Image (cartoon, helix red, strand yellow):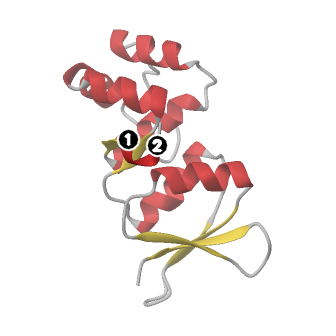
Amino acid sequence: MVASERTERVKLSQWEALLLESLRVLGWSDEELIAKTKRGELPKEDTSIYEFNYAELTAFAAKEPDIFEAAVRSGYRIKYNTIRGIRSWIAVALQLEPELVLDEGREAVIASLTPVELERLSGVLSHGWTIANGEQEGVYRIVPQA
């Protein structure tokens, strides 16, 4: 398939992406994740700083089953990222603690990423963000596009 024939990834809200990624770290297969979400067999309580309410993901999967399943099986792009949302996605999906820089005009998320993690992050970021090389090899700055 040539690039022009590829279909664009489905789009999820930043929150939907965080909910999905928080379940991925449980080690479930795509099929398990889809089935458990459809049946509402998700954790009842989330004790993380995010306090995820998985009933929201079950409701989304019921309302938009094709989008949900495509996101799980084929990946997704986030509709709109915020700088704090990017930091949270890296923390949840990649289990890393990136640095958050909120200085006006220098806003950035700084993270040490492997090539696989870098590819995964670049695949989900919404438009309007750039990943630049940091000061050290393997360290990247995620910044708003100029």
Q: Amino acid at mark 2?
A: Val
- Residue receiving disc 2: 2
- Name above or below for residue 8 compared with residue 27: below
**For the residue labelled by badge 2, is the local secondary structure a helix, a strand or a loop?**
loop
- Asked where in the image residue 100 lies, by quadrant, the reply is bottom right
Residue drawn 58% across the image and 18% down it = 29
Say if residue 51 shows up in the picture: no
Disc assigned to residue 105: none
The image quadrant that residue 98 belongs to is bottom right
Q: 32 or 76, which lies in front?
A: 76
Q: Is residue 31 above or below residue 53?
A: above
Secondary structure at badge 1 equals helix
Q: Amino acid at mark 1?
A: Glu
> Going by the picture, which residue comes out furthest to the bottom?
105
At horizontal 45% and vertical 34% (from top left) the residue drawn is 20
The residue at the far left in this view is 63
| Residue 117 falls left or right of residue 24 | right
Neighbours of disc 2 within 10 Å: few (<14), some (14-19), many (20+)? few
**Residue in view at x 69 percent, y 78 percent:** 134
Q: For the C terminus, which image quadrant?
A: bottom left
Query: Are the residues flagged by discs 2 and 1 in contact, CB closer than 8 Å?
Result: yes
In this rendering, position of residue 43 left or right of residue 63: right
Q: Find residue 35 and report its horizontal and vertical position in percent.
A: 42, 11
Q: From what the image shows, is residue 82 above or below residue 67?
A: below
Q: Which residue position is annotated with label 1?
A: 5
